[in-house]
Image (cartoon, helix red, strand yellow):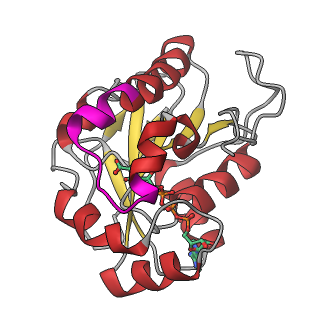
Amino acid sequence: MDVGQNAQNEDGTTPLPIDLDGRQPVLVVMGVSGSGKSTVAALLAGQLGWDFAEGDDLHPDANVEKMASGTPLTDDDRWPWLDTVSSWVIEHAMADVPGIITCSALKRKYRDVLRERNVIFVHMVGSKQLLGTRMSARLDHFMPTTLLDSQLDTLEPLDSDEQGILIDASRPPAEGAAMVVRQLHLKPAAGSSALGAPNPGQSTAPKRG
Ligand SMILES: Nc1ncnc2c1ncn2[C@@H]1O[C@H](COP(=O)(O)OP(=O)(O)O)[C@@H](O)[C@H]1O
Ligand SMILES: O=C(O)[C@H](O)[C@@H](O)[C@H](O)[C@H](O)COP(=O)(O)O
């Protein structure tokens, strides 16, 4: 699959040519809290009929309780969660089954454990003001808006040698999803998941709460 060769990122830069060596892509939709990862990823998964997992639902309960109480996670808190996310990514990447998972993946070293040849990071980028407004309006979520500063401080944007694209979080979700499809030349799945996901396009992560 020849993806991204001639596409441009929204900021006008040209992404690295993405060479999937004929394999199916696994998208990791990343970015700080409130950037629209879950919204755009679910839309994309539904449109494409791909396997989908919501990374928030893979956190150990202790992590969720810690974030809900207003304390940022440490690296040590995140590693077990990243292991679970990584297992999902590797299972799909190795089986050559396309998939989409959300994961903040704030630091490069976190992305290193998710990186496979056919993994593409989709970084949702928005201003602090926009994200803060969205987080404050989101009433059914454990993540308090007070953690936005630490999320932004922790974020290490994609380096130029990382396989990925940037999506402007201020666009409507359907436009963001369409940008991903266009930039990566994505195609809907022909049939249901070869890994047996019962409903491709719906998160297979256990529902939290
Ligand atoms: N492009 C968008 N335009 C308007 N509202 C959005 C958009 N993307 C997400 N939202 C809203 O913003 C909030 C945060 O989005 P969400 O997808 O939960 O972000 P994340 O998964 O990155 O934390 C949600 O209430 C969602 O409905
Ligand atoms: O590494 C972290 O600190 C968390 O994973 C965090 O980055 C993530 O964003 C939360 O899971 C909140 O959930 P939302 O991203 O859905 O707000």
Please tell me which residue is depicted at 38% across the width and 45% down the height of the picture: 121
Q: Answer above or below: position of 87 versus 133.
A: above
Q: Is residue 187 left or right of residue 200?
A: left
Out of 10 and 94, give the one closest to the viewer: 94
**Is residue 125 on the magenta stretch?**
no
Q: Answer above or below: position of 146 versus 39.
A: below
Please tell me which residue is depicted at 41% across the width and 59% down the height of the picture: 69
Residue 32 appears in the figure? yes
Asked which quadrant contains residue 169, the reply is: bottom left
Residue 29 appears in the figure? no
Residue 98 locus on image (x, y percent): 60, 30
Residue 206 locus on image (x, y percent): 68, 33
Residue 66 locus on image (x, y percent): 39, 49
Residue 152 locus on image (x, y percent): 24, 66
Please tell me which residue is depicted at 36% across the width and 71% down the height of the picture: 10
Q: Is residue 13 left or right of residue 186?
A: left
What range is drawn magenta here?
67-80
Please tell me which residue is depicted at 28% across the width and 62% down the height of the picture: 151
Out of 18 and 130, give the one closest to the viewer: 130
- Residue placed furthest toward the top: 95
